[in-house]
Image (cartoon, grey):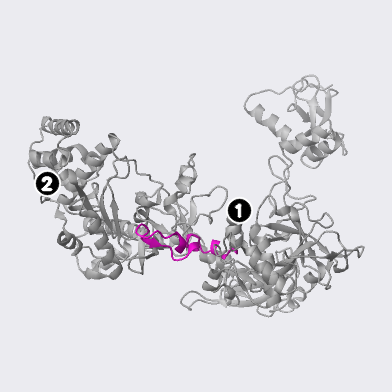
Amino acid sequence: QALVNFSDYQIFEELVKGKEGDTFYMNCVTEMMRVVVDAGCLTQQNVLEYLGKSFRVKLNLPEWYSNEQAADFILNKCICIHLTNRTEKFYLLCMMTRKLYAFAKGECMEDNPDSLMNQEVLTPGQLFLMFLKERLESWLQSVKFVLEKRKEKADISINTDSLAKAFSLATDFSKPFEYLLATGNLRSKTGLGMLQDSGLCVVGDKLNFIRYLSHFRCIHRGAAFSQMRTTTVRKLLPESWGFLCPVDTPDGEPCGLMNHMTAVCEIVTEMVPVIDIPPLLCSLGVTPIDGTPTKPYVECCRVVLDGSVVGWVEWELAPEIAETLRRFKITQEKRFPARAEVVLIPMTGKPSLYPGLFIFTTPCRMVRPVRNLFYGKNEWIGTLEQVFMNVATLESEVVPGVTTHQELFPHCILSVVANLIPFSDHNQSPRNMYQCQMGKQTMGFPVYNYKDRSDNKLYRLHTPQSPLVRPSMYDYYGMDSYPIGTNSIVAVISYSGYDMEDAMIVNKSSWQRGFAYGSVIKMESIDLSLKASRAGDNLVFGVRPGDPNVTEKLDADGLPFVGSILQPGDPFYSFMNLNTGETFTVYYPNKEVGIVDNVRLCSNDRGTGKFKKACITVRVPRNPTVGDKFASRHGQKGILSQLWPVEDMPFMENGMVPDILFNPHGFPSRMTIGMLIESMAGKSAALHGVSYDATPFTFTEKNSALNYFGETLVSAGYNFFGTEKMYSGISGLELEAEIFVGVVYYQRLRHMVSDKFQVRTTGPRDAVTNQPVKGRNVEGGIRFGEMERDALLAHGTSFLLQDRLFNCSDGSVAYVCTSCGSMTSPMLEKPPHSSVVSSRRYSCSVCSMVDTIEVVPVPHVFRYFVAELAAMNIKTKLNVE
């Protein structure tokens, strides 16, 4: 009634259209309207007055706003805010009322908020726009405040100068944006209607190219959902087929919340004008919303365009109109947008989605291309649209007259990273998930311009190779420019016991030839303007002339020589204070030997700054050592457990020795058959000098991969199953079993033992408890916890237990009075004035006795605990016998 100037009967008529036979619904509507009349709201003015009076308490509006203006504010800002026209809002509210009653009576189902068909993506542009709008409002408020303050002091005229001065005094406008981009934290009074205000930015780190690429395809459901106890949010729903990758989601806490878009999925970003669409619909046979259709309302459904009800259409005509709009969409006739979504939700007679013809053209929706079989062209389809379509995956599945669309290729349901797994359709699904995570942690060749970059840390593989067996998408993305691994000869054999539980043995001579050599490039940025302690200090890089400790290692400008080797504790750089003449030398902090890769002097962004900033790049060589992590492309991770001398390795009849020995127990329970096929395909590729296509879903049960690659191996003169006779490297005897040998592409992961190992003899202790601190960086210890104590108790190793929990932790002695049992009362006696060498003793300050004091070894933390209890007025009594 507040939205439109209709009579009560017109509103009643609009609400009950098509439900004239439903007496329950008619009575409900009548009852609602009677309540409004009882409240004294007879005309539109009355209703506006009533609404404004009721709600203005919460709206923070100025006093001079009348109640009607307050009601207008509510209608504009709070009700159906995607529409501007009041009449459109009225018709939409009528439809919402009908839908609510249909749901209450069980005629339609509940819309699932976790389903992709009811969701859209929050793009950075949308977030920035909302933030910009809010910042502009607050900035205008501050300008107004400045002008008001100045007007109080003196009469000012509003001209260019006074406004410019007010602008300069107002709050800074660009700082909040820089803060948002730098930290990902949103500082906003209203919260912009977001469920989270932090974590809105991630660092696009170039650990390798795959990781960098997948940052831009990642979609997170929101941090608020990770705290929820329910798992319904994380479920993989069938509606997300083709839009979200079913494999590429991390395991653990963010599982199912952090998803990645498929390779072909896109997000609509363009805004399209929709002013031509309602007339176009009317020309196709849609009755405008205020008109009367030819059939009764029961046989019609509503037509909704971008959340605005535009008309009625007869059920018989609706499929034809939807098909015509689809034709316009594909052929671009009548300027109909190509990425619009046309959804006809049919009347099923069962409680399903609320029926109607829906058209969406708004941005931020997910769309993907499929082939329209009737027109033979590609068509963009949306998430809600897909549910009511018949899309075939393969050509063999097309049913004439039923199937309308076909996928472009079967692996378009996978994301960019999942598409790089060879033969992923032969693997167990969790293994593909693990590989999607590990592919992002691979040492590879991330950038070409690493000499000019200033990343904190870059990992580089020295001898990367192009894989012999690769999916088609590998070449599509040009991954050979950024390779991530090495082809290695792998024998599946249990040899020596050093390969238990996912460990693997590497041939020592392969290692000496440079297998998986790499280095970490670390960047040290020194800004002298931040190091000045007093305001007037003038700091520059340099060394004190004639300082023998420094001149060998540092140049005259106080920076290290390019190519010099830095040992731990060597001088790293030196700077001096020109005012006082002091020189400060900083020493190389790392525990590993590094090589100075390059030294750069930096200025500020405009190039006008003094040379107060230097960037030193240090290269730390990291060749594989025992304990480094490797993985194949099938989620089969393992650590290097032994570099085995080549003379003790098993060898084949032609004298070849494998690079890696892989334990056969890694296959049965994990079912990574893709790795076995890759091994055969890689061997065959090396023999024939070609690279084989490993795209998933190319082989079927009739045309199996085993037969195909078995035949290619036979044609090269090898065994059909990829096995070979091998000889023991220790005894020289032929091994009884035939060994499966092939070529597998192995990746070296960034988890290296030199970044992880922790060792401590003595070191820093906690100031309060006197126990060793924790943390690798501060040379802390590893906590010997409650459960570890239980294990030693169960073994009865009491001396070891005392050693761990007492001697190596916070062992100390306490003085206890045996008569009163107090640990806090024994005090050291005051020394007598006369004697030079005093033999001071402890005496109990309560009993005033000396010979009752005993020395008891207790943990220091217990003494602290007793002191804390005493501070709370609780007495602790010890029975010392």
Residue 382 locus on image (x, y percent): 36, 58
User: The residue under label 2 is which amino acid type?
Assistant: Val
Confirm whether the magenta stretch covers residue 404.
Answer: yes
Q: Quadrant of the N terminus?
A: top left
Task: Please identify the residue farthest to the right as the structure is shown.
Answer: 731
Quarter location, residue 30: top left
Quarter location, residue 47: top left
Task: Please identify the residue farthest to the bottom as the structure is shown.
Answer: 556
Inter-mark Cα distance, 1 to 2: 60 Å
The crowding category of the residue bearing disc 2, from other C-alpha atoms within 10 Å (few below 14, some 14 to 19, many at least 20), is: some
The answer to whether residue 539 of the structure is visible from this angle is: no
Q: Which residues are magenta?
A: 394-422
Q: Secondary structure at mark 1?
A: loop
Which residue is rendered at x = 56% and y = 70% of the image? 474
Quarter location, residue 436: bottom right
**Residue 214 or residue 189, whichever sits in front:** 214
Q: Examine the rendered structure and indicate whether residue 447 appears above or below residue 170.
A: below
Residue 196 locus on image (x, y percent): 43, 49
Residue 766 locus on image (x, y percent): 70, 44
Which callout, 1 or 2, points at the residue further toward the start of the chain? 2
Q: Which residue is mark 1?
A: 428
